[in-house]
Amino acid sequence: MSKVYATGKRKTAIAKVWLKPGSGKMAINGQSLDEWLGGLDLLKKRVMQPLMLTKQEQSVDIIATTKGGGVSAQADAVRHGISKALVIYDNEFRAILKPQGLLTRDARVVERKKYGKKKARRSPQFSKR
């Protein structure tokens, strides 16, 4: 099978993920996972979660580019993209990834600010006099 493409999203971060059969190499924004996330081990585990569950760590190569959001949101977007790409790569992985909630786009985004408020919901302090 040739390259498989999927898009992952979280908050305002977007990840374009290409997955192909290989030896387990991972490049995100032209860097390895360790270079990209540095010492953030929890985020590294979250990015690798779909590969661990499907036991594909050493059998697929991943190339991803991310845009927007922060490091954490980008990591979650890459995880979402990898999950979607794995299902396209082999539909049997859907039964493993779906119950873990890895194919669901996390729809929580920042609420917009309303006029007359200091933030989305915070009102100005009340003054009696």
Image (cartoon, rainbow, N blue to C red):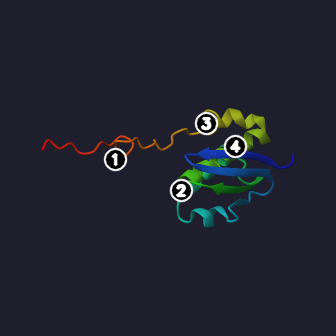
Q: Mark 1 sits on what residue?
A: 118
- Which label belongs to residue 54? 4
Residue 27 sits in quarter: bottom right
| Secondary element at image label 3 | loop
Could you give the CA–CA distance between mark 4 and mark 1, rounded to whole angstroms? 46 Å
Q: Amino acid at mark 1?
A: Lys
Q: Mark 3 sits on what residue?
A: 104
**Where in the figure is residue 101, as x and y percent of width and height?**
59, 36
Would you place residue 31 above or below residue 66 in this image?
below
Q: Mark 2 sits on what residue?
A: 70
Within-10-Å neighbours for mark 2: few <14, some 14–19, many 20+ = few
Do tag 4 and tag 3 residues touch (Cβ < 8 Å)? Answer: no
**Which of the two discs, 2 and 1, sits closer to the camera?**
1
Q: Which is nearer the N-term, disc 4 or disc 1?
A: 4
Could you give the CA–CA distance between mark 1 and mark 3, rounded to whole angstroms? 32 Å
Could you give the CA–CA distance between mark 4 and mark 3, rounded to whole angstroms? 17 Å
| Camera-nearest residue between 123 and 96 | 123
